[in-house]
Image (tube, rainbow, N blue to C red):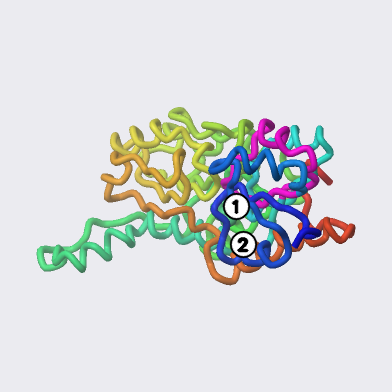
Amino acid sequence: HLDKPEVLAVSKLSPLFKPQLEAAYMLHDRLHETDPAALADAAPRIRAIAASGESKVPAALIERLPALQIISVMGVGYDGIDVAAAKERGVMVTHTPNVLNDDVADLAIGLMLSAARQLPAADRYVRSGDWQRGAMPLARKMSGARLGLVGIGRIGQAIAQRAAAFGMPIAYTARTPRAELSYRYFPDARSLAAESDFLVIITPGGAGTRKMIDAAVLQALGPKGILVNVARGSVVDEAALIDALENGTIAGAGLDVFENEPNVPERLKALPHVVLAPHIGSATGQTRQAMADLAFGNLRAHFAGTALLTPVPECQ
Ligand code: 8YV
């Protein structure tokens, strides 16, 4: 027990990740939030942080851990981690890319189809007895409609491959065009939205994309347009989105992420044509197990002195 590496869990960890950590290490569960004195006592021995994709690890916390060597994130997104501060201290950061590409891409397609064909509303329509009083209003067709991807990384490309099977012309915006891709490139979200029927957000979170999808982009998407967000709530100006949905500036939305999870504004929940999901992009048993194993595998590699499996790009 005394020679086990000591690890600080900074969030409520997945039940697929935490037991692996407890078996192999001395795990301190969110001491930084519950017991500052205990953290101060353990700090000189804590060599690793275990986090989820939503965890916040600011420079101030990194500074309190003089022995910190690695931050392992069970998630592909690590926008809450101060990577610059970690790098300055020589602390490695790892995440869990690729193993969740299919799940997030599948959910994006599911939200597109649900928002276009109003599937949750259709279910309510049958259960409520409304069908006895007449047919549902006509929906919007998805096959053959124009897809605009904001972000074209591994998950964005997985969404594009799925959308191609629906006969959807595909375009994207990203910091720079990707010469190896055959999809049409737009330099920014607003010009892309003007040429899209579905605008799907699949960029990283963080300062670089904060409120990238604003009132002007939503105006460009237009009254037949549908917005889907499977990235981070921070990428969309949520107040502008609610206004646009209430005013008919856009036709609908499918949202898996929100600005202040798990709190969702009542105005958004009151909109029957909006499809809402509780950040379940990667939430299948198989994928979360793979993410937990990969996040644990990075810690195991670190303490064994072998190559890390999936360091974040900034640490490669
Ligand atoms: C989960 C995610 O929110 O991978 C991400 O960045 O957003 C999701 O996988 C979470 O990180 C799983 O722990």
Which amino acid lies under the numbered mark 2 shown in the image of this protein? Lys
Residue 94 at x, y = what percent? 74, 51
Q: For the point 68% across and 62% down, which residue is it?
A: 21
Q: Label 1 to label 2, Cα distance in Å? A: 9 Å
- In the displayed structure, 256 sits above or below 293; it is above
Callout 1–callout 2 Cβ contact below 8 Å: yes
Q: Is residue 264 magenta?
A: no
Instruction: Inspect the image, locate mark 1, and give the three-letter code of the amino acid beneath it.
Output: Asp
Q: Is residue 312 among the parts visible in the rendering?
A: no
Q: Nearer the viewer, residue 293 or 178?
A: 293
Secondary element type, mark 1: strand
Q: Nearer the viewer, residue 132 or 282?
A: 282
* Label 1 packing within 10 angstroms: few (<14), some (14-19), many (20+): some
Write down the residue under mark 1: 29
Report the mark closest to the observer, 1 or 2.
1
Q: Please provide percent x and percent y for residue 121.
A: 27, 59
Badge 2 is on which residue?
A: 18
At a point 52% along the width and 31% down the height, the residue shown is 211
Q: Quadrant of the N terminus?
A: bottom right
Number of residue marks: 2
User: What residue occupies the far top of the structure in this picture?
Assistant: 216
Q: Which residues are magenta?
A: 48-71
